[in-house]
Image (cartoon, grey):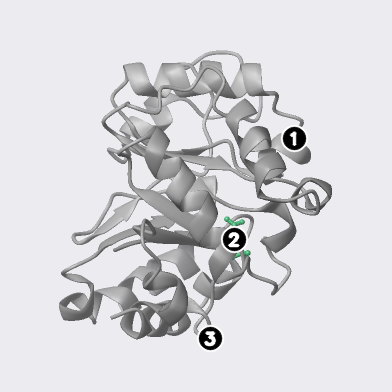
Amino acid sequence: MIFAANFKTNHTRASTGEYIEVLLLETSLLKDDAVYIFPPTSALQASKEPIKIGAQNAYMTQNGAYTGEIGLDQLDEFAIRTIIIGHSERREILAESQEFIAKKFQFFKEHNFEIIYCIGEPPEIRERGDGAVLEYLSTQFEGIDTNYEKIMIAYEPIWAIGTGKSATIDEISITHNALRELTKAPLLYGGSVNSNNIQQIAKIDNVDGVLVGSASLNAKDFLELISLSK
Ligand code: PEP
């Protein structure tokens, strides 16, 4: 399975280093999985086998005048080749439009990055049922090459992120089965994945991995979550 830990605006360079050291004590547990850590920008560092470090965000530039952003030069320093694009927090809080996201996707695709591309519906769409959800999600694929060989798609219902209320097994299953019709890409589920629900979520057809926020912040908890998925 794919396990991706999104630290968001948590952890420092020092604590990210310590976190990785804790994970590396358990390489035998990690060897059959793909494990990604997305620390904050200030804690970016080179990947340490078998753990891959990715960027939560970057701007579509080699370098230049983009105050507050980083570009390829800063990612190249640590040989980072994985990025998250389209996370709902960037869509909502940072007001990234689908057009902007698609341009960013295109740029990092052209630079051969692995891209975790996030999609997910707000609560008022979920209330209208599966058809409305799938229609909404299709708008988040505008300008996105779902056949790109290095895309992973993370289905993350907005109402499930950081709320402790994961989507139900049926909701995940219906959505992932529909996504599978669209693409052969690995499909991740994200939204309040934790050690209480990982066993059930890991068993769902067409769930190839999970993107984990809160429950990934403690290295031992994240290791436990990985071991419970087996
Ligand atoms: C996320 O924001 O990508 C996420 C899945 O967060 P959480 O696990 O905290 O719901």
Residue at image mark 1: 94
Local SS, label 1: loop
Q: Amino acid at mark 3?
A: Asn
Instruction: Depth check: give the residue in front, 125 or 97.
Output: 125
Where residue 16 appears, as percent x and y from the top left, is 45, 65
> Going from the N terminus, do you reach mark 3 or mark 2 first?
2
Local SS, label 2: helix
> Going from the N terminus, do you reach mark 1 or mark 2 first?
1
CA gap between label 3 and label 2 equals 17 Å
Q: Is residue 114 left or right of residue 125?
A: left
Q: Are marks 1 and 2 in contact (CB under 8 Å)?
A: no
Q: Residue at x 29, y 63 (%)?
A: 1
> Going from the N terminus, do you reach mark 1 or mark 3 first?
1
Instruction: Depth check: give the residue in front, 63 or 83.
Output: 83
CA gap between label 1 and label 3 equals 31 Å
Residue 6 visible, this orientation: no
Where residue 152 appears, as percent x and y from the top left, is 38, 42
Residue at image mark 2: 171
Local SS, label 3: loop
CA gap between label 1 and label 2 equals 27 Å
Q: Are marks 3 and 2 in contact (CB under 8 Å)?
A: no
Residue at image mark 3: 196
Q: Amino acid at mark 2?
A: Glu
Q: Is residue 125 left or right of residue 56?
A: right
Placement of 127 over or under 121, stated as above or below: below
Q: Nearer the observer, disc 1 or disc 3?
A: 3
Where residue 90 appears, as percent x and y from the top left, is 68, 39
Q: Residue at x 70, y 35 (%)?
A: 91
Q: Nearer the observer, disc 1 or disc 2?
A: 2
Ligand 1 positioned in quadrant: bottom right
Q: Residue at x 66, y 49 (%)?
A: 130
